[in-house]
Image (cartoon, coloured by chain):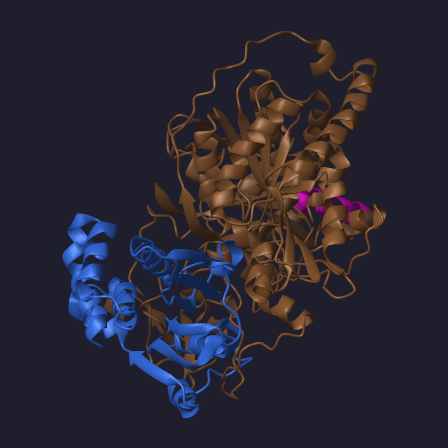
């Protein structure tokens, strides 16, 4: 059947068709929908794991158990999962094991632009890269065949424009793959030095055999258009190149980006006069070509940074691009903002007012760094706020401890903030950590997590008790605040900063986008009372704007969270019925 | 047989429902036997920021994205986003724009001004513009949340397919109890 599927949905379809039994992931744009879509198929056990390392280990365990297994993550998630992944490369698989990693060239939704192909090289793992949804599905299935044939985990690399683009997939039936019988095999599965040494030799030999496979496999193919110029491409870039250059060049389209073929590339280079390597991010294919003595044009013509497109390629090849019209007027930017009614807004408003150092983290609340709140000092990685604050305070001493906090979401705290909090308790810093518990993994599109009491399929399960967890690691001062009560937030913050010993303040208010959160009627501004002081604008609510010198609330956006009411010195903001 | 496809850009503000519009459009073109590609942006950009989705269909579509001067039609859910996307429109392309203004944060904080009379200025450049007050039409249909479907209706009229085909697609896409509302909203957009 022909279906229009998102690249991520097509990977999930491939998992289903390949007979996969266990799927474990942590959400991360642009990879999240793979696991969400996989959970629609009842034949597969699917879960949100606390983090990517756990997810990869669950997949490894399922492979030991003889099942085809899977985990998905964004590029930076592979940093977290790298520890098990590197050693699973030595161990190989029992049931086939595939990891999907979604890179984000252009950083639509990421903190860096790392190129995961470098991981495939470093971990010595085969990596496939599809260039549309059809290939997302078929490469996923192929990955399991490769995994079991070559005794290796396989990485499927996506980029944003593949993961989040829909194209047509010819779907097929699921093939049930029986569990492999369990056999104890410590020499393969227990990586002690004595056992690991021969496995390293195995890995080197495996890479040699995979390179041979790469020479002749159908997913590495030459499209010979009898032209003088040849381009080597993979993934989304193949599509951009086809769009920009059509039949005016010949193509070597690589479906497997590690290990790369040698003879096939030499053969292609012999067919044309000039070879271009067009690749987003790092010059991985280009360096390989140079290493095997094939002269190519690459990063001297194409950028290292950002996302490519058909026009970027056309420009390099001197092809004139289309004309268009535009108006002279300057068009203001529209950066992302916290939603109307967001429980994080009052926290950042208070942190800014109190002029504290804010060690930030990854999630919707990273928007607390943007104008007008601008209340975040640092943001590095998942969980980094808590341990980072501890380091900051150890460096700057007791005075800094009274003027600094970490902010971290519920899901991020479980992901890797808890270990930092243990460090704070164990190594005695008087740090104040604020857990912004909005009852969901928000930024990636509302996934449940171990604190929400629901599984990926919405089934009721146990929920982490954050207060008890913080107490258990040795934090005595734990308190909960209402994020819509500015006075309560301020009082709690001041008291905990002054207190001896570390503290945790849990700000508890559900994400305003959650379906079960009831919105209140829009607030209104009494135009007679409003003096146009703009105090209400300080919270950066998208529903409040100034018109003709007075504040105005957009009734289509306001959800009646009341946060702005207390900011108004002349009590001009209120409920509609009071104003009437 | 070669059929001419189209490049359609749908732009708006995160949360306005542009994604759904592109999915309905893509599904319709798949049913008509076209090769189809849609490109979306999820994650951080969706939080009240500018959102852009691309819908491309034809005999064979390679790139999932639309760039400068390549769009046959831009469907804009908001005026400022229409102006921002304008350079992507072909010189003889059509802009279908919802007459709605949503202030972006730099305007809210007073760092920038929301430009006046944007639609007039765009028309002044010789661009073919169809301005639709989708909110009013949606309210006429019975629910202000149907803005989405009104705009799809306005766009659909320019895609050369009969109205009944679209009404059937909507009948299949939305839950049964919302079918008549959405079909009414679509028809009002189609007539706009």
> Which shade of the palette goes to chain B?
blue
What is the x, y in percent for residue A331?
A: 52, 80
Prevalent SS, magenta region: helix
Give the position of the C terminus of chain A as an image quadrant.
bottom left
Query: Tag count in the figure?
Result: 0
- Magenta stretch containing residue A389, yes or no? yes
Is residue B166 shown left or right of residue A192? left
In which quarter of the view is residue B126 placed?
bottom left
Q: Residue at 73% of width from left, 58% of height from top?
A: A272
Is the residue A34 above or below the residue B49 in the image? Answer: above
Q: Would you place residue A512 above or below residue B191 in this image?
A: above
Q: Which chain is brown?
A: A
Of all residues, the one furthest to the bottom in this rendering is B124
Q: Measured along the vertical axis of the image, is residue B48 above or below residue B134?
A: above
Instruction: Report whether A112 appears left or right of A464.
Output: right
Which segment is the magenta one? Answer: A383-394
Give the answer, above or below, for where B100 lies relative to B123: above
Q: Nearer the viewer, residue A165 or A228?
A: A228
Q: Residue at x 71, y 42 (%)?
A: A387
**How far across and down, in percent of the image, does residue A432 sit?**
65, 45
């Amino acid at each position: 059947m022909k279906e229009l599927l998102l690249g991520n949905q097509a990977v999930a379809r491939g998992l289903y068709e390949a007979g996969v039994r266990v799927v474990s992931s942590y959400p991360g744009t642009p990879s999240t929908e793979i696991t969400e879509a996989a959970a629609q198929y009842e034949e597969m056990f699917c879960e949100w794991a606390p983090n990517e390392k756990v997810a990869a280990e669950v997949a490894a365990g399922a492979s030991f158990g003889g099942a085809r297994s899977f985990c998905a993550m964004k590029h930076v998630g592979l940093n977290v999962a790298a520890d098990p992944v590197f050693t699973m490369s030595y161990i190989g698989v029992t049931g086939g094991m595939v990891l999907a990693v979604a890179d984000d060239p252009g950083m639509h939704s990421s903190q860096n632009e790392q190129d995961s192909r470098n991981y495939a090289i470093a971990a010595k793992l085969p990596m496939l890269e599809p260039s549309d949804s059809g290939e997302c599905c078929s490469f996923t299935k192929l990955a399991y065949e490769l995994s079991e044939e070559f005794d290796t985990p396989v990485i499927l690399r996506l980029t944003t424009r593949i993961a989040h683009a829909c194209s047509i997939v010819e779907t097929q039936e699921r093939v049930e793959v029986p569990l492999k019988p369990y056999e104890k095999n410590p020499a393969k599965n227990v990586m002690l030095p004595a056992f690991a040494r021969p496995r390293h030799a195995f890995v080197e030999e495996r890479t040699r055999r995979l390179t041979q496979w790469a020479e002749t496999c159908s997913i590495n193919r030459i499209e010979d258009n009898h032209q003088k110029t040849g381009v080597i491409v993979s993934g989304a870039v193949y599509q951009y190149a086809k769009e920009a250059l059509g039949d005016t060049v010949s193509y070597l389209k690589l479906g497997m980006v590690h290990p790369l073929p040698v003879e096939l590339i030499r053969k292609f280079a012999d067919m044309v006069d000039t070879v271009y390597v067009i690749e987003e991010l790092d010059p991985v294919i280009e360096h390989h070509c140079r290493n095997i003595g094939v002269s190519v044009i690459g990063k001297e013509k194409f950028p290292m940074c950002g996302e490519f497109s058909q026009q970027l390629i056309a420009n390099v090849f001197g092809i004139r691009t289309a004309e268009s019209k535009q108006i002279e007027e300057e068009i203001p930017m529209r950066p992302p903002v916290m939603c109307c009614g967001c429980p994080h807004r009052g926290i950042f408003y208070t942190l800014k007012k109190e002029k504290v150092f804010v060690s930030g983290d990854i999630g919707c609340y990273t928007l607390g760094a943007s104008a007008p709140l601008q209340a975040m000092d640092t943001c590095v990685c998942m969980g980094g706020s808590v341990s980072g604050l501890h380091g900051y305070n150890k460096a700057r001493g007791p005075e800094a401890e009274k003027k600094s906090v970490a902010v971290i979401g519920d899901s991020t705290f479980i992901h890797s903030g808890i270990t930092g909090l243990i460090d704070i308790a164990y190594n005695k810093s008087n740090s104040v950590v604020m857990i912004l518990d909005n009852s969901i993994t928000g930024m990636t599109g509302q996934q449940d997590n171990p604190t929400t009491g629901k599984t990926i399929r919405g089934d009721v399960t146990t929920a982490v008790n954050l207060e008890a967890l913080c107490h258990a690691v040795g934090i005595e001062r734990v308190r909960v605040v209402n994020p819509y009560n500015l006075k309560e937030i301020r009082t709690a913050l001041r008291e905990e900063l002054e207190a001896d010993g570390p503290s945790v303040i849990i700000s508890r208010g559900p994400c305003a986008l959650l379906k079960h959160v009831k919105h209140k009627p829009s607030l209104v501004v009494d135009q007679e009372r409003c003096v146009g002081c703009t105090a209400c604008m300080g919270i950066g609510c998208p529903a409040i704007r100034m018109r003709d010198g007075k504040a105005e609330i957009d009734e289509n956006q306001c959800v009646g969270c009341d946060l702005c009411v207390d900011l108004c010195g002349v009590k001009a903001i209120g409920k509609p019925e009071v104003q009437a | 047989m070669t059929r001419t496809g189209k490049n359609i850009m749908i732009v708006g503000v995160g949360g306005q429902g542009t994604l759904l519009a592109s999915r309905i459009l893509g599904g319709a073109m798949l049913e008509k036997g076209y090769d189809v590609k849609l490109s979306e942006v999820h994650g951080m950009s969706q939080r009240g920021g500018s959102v852009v989705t691309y819908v491309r269909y034809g005999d064979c579509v390679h790139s999932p994205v639309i760039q400068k001067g390549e769009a046959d039609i831009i469907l804009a859910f908001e005026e400022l986003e229409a102006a921002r996307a304008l350079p992507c429109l072909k010189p003889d392309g059509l802009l279908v724009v919802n007459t709605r203004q949503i202030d972006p944060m730099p305007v809210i904080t007073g760092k920038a001004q929301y430009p006046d009379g944007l639609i007039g200025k765009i028309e002044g450049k010789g661009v073919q513009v169809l301005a639709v007050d989708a909110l009013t039409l949606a309210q006429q249909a019975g629910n202000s949340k149907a803005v989405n479907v009104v705009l799809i209706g306005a766009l659909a009229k320019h895609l050369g397919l009969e109205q009944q085909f679209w009404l059937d697609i909507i009948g299949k896409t939305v839950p049964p109890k919302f079918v008549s509302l959405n079909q009414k909203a679509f028809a009002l957009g189609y007539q706009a």
